[in-house]
Image (cartoon, grey):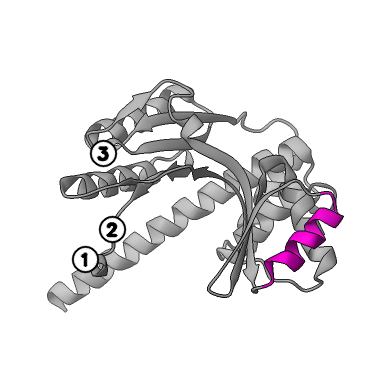
């Protein structure tokens, strides 16, 4: 067996660790959303959405059910959302969203990740102004005008609709997410959304080169390994190998 077996075993353990991290992340998100808005998806659109995302990412049903049952009970953990902003390699901007029941642990882990990658944390608001907080929905198609018309009929405040390579992307204010999603589902029954998220969209990108690319990838790996980190947003752009 030798080296091949060791490599295969390492890959299996790595995959298992990634799955465990993914399940834990969704478990926390589902718990918090259910705790805040009710543990029944039919009456809690945010819970319905996060469960749909979890199922798409192949999170087992028992993980979802356990988080909902936990939220429906009395007591439980007291998670809070925390956002950190900082400056990554090459001067790129980074936003880190966390769910935590221990602020000291979270800030220590996030700061350590930045420091090890040669990056630094900034004050609240130091980079957020370089991003737009938007609802982004995507679906196959090439008739953006038809999509825009349907959204406007449902009084959705649309920022932009882009059509490219047979895909349509809709951008709206973050608070319009559920209204926009419902409008699409009602106007186009059976529509399959390949993107449905509330995210930070960078206004400009910072192109990374040389050693900054490796340092940035290290930062992303370290942040994704942090127990409390839920989402990481950035404006870094890494040139593709074929681009030259």
> Which label sits on residue 244?
1
Q: Provide the major secondary structure of the magenta segment.
A: helix
Per the image, label 1 sits on a secondary structure element best described as loop
Q: Which residues are magenta?
A: 143-155
Eyeballing the image, is 46 above or below 56? above
Residue 146 lies within the magenta run: yes
Find the residue positioned furthest to the bottom: 1
**Label 2 close to label 1 by CB (< 8 Å):** yes
Around disc 3, counting alpha carbons within 10 Å, would you say few (fewer than 14), some (14 to 19), or many (20 or more)?
many
Residue 111 position, x and y percent, is 33, 28
Tell me if I can see residue 65 in this picture: no
Q: Residue at (33%, 60%) from the top-left corner?
A: 14
Which of the 4 quarters of the picture holds residue 48? bottom right
Eyeballing the image, is 59 above or below 99? below
Residue 123 position, x and y percent, is 42, 20
Whole-number angstrom distance, CA of label 1 to CA of label 3: 22 Å
Residue 20 position, x and y percent, is 46, 54
Q: Residue at (76%, 41%) from the top-left corner?
A: 72
**Label 3 close to label 2 by CB (< 8 Å):** no
Find the residue positioned furthest to the left: 2
In which quadrant of the rendered image does the N terminus lie?
bottom left
Per the image, label 3 sits on a secondary structure element best described as helix
Around disc 2, counting alpha carbons within 10 Å, would you say few (fewer than 14), some (14 to 19), or many (20 or more)?
few
Q: Which of the two residues, 64 or 152, is positioned nearer the viewer here?
A: 152
The residue pinned by badge 3 equals: 89
The residue pinned by badge 2 equals: 239
Q: Residue at (16%, 49%) from the top-left corner?
A: 210
Eyeballing the image, is 41 above or below 105? below
Left of 78 or right of it: where is 68? right
Q: Residue at (30%, 33%) from the top-left corner?
A: 114
């Amino acid at each position: 067996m030798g080296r091949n077996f060791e490599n295969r075993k390492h890959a299996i353990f790595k995959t298992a660790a990634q799955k465990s991290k993914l399940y834990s992340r969704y478990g926390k998100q589902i718990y918090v959303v259910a705790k805040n808005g009710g543990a029944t998806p039919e009456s809690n659109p945010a819970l319905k959405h996060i469960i749909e995302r979890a199922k798409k990412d192949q999170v087992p049903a028992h993980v979802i059910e356990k988080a909902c049952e936990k939220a429906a009970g009395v007591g439980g953990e007291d998670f809070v959302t925390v956002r950190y902003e900082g400056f990554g390699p090459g001067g790129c901007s980074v936003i880190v969203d966390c769910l935590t029941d221990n602020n000291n642990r979270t800030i220590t882990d996030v700061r350590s990740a930045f420091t090890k990658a040669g990056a630094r944390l900034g004050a609240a608001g130091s980079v957020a102004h370089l991003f737009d907080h938007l609802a982004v929905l995507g679906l196959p198609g090439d008739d953006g005008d038809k999509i825009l018309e349907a959204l406007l009929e449902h009084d959705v405040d649309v920022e932009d609709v882009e059509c490219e390579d047979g895909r349509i992307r809709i951008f709206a204010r973050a608070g319009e997410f559920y209204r926009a999603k419902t409008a699409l589902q009602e106007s186009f029954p059976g529509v399959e959304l390949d993107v449905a998220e509330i995210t930070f969209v960078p206004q400009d990108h910072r192109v990374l080169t040389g050693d900054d690319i490796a340092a940035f990838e290290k930062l992303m790996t370290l942040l994704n390994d942090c127990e409390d980190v839920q989402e990481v947003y950035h404006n870094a752009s890494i040139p593709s190998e074929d681009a030259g």
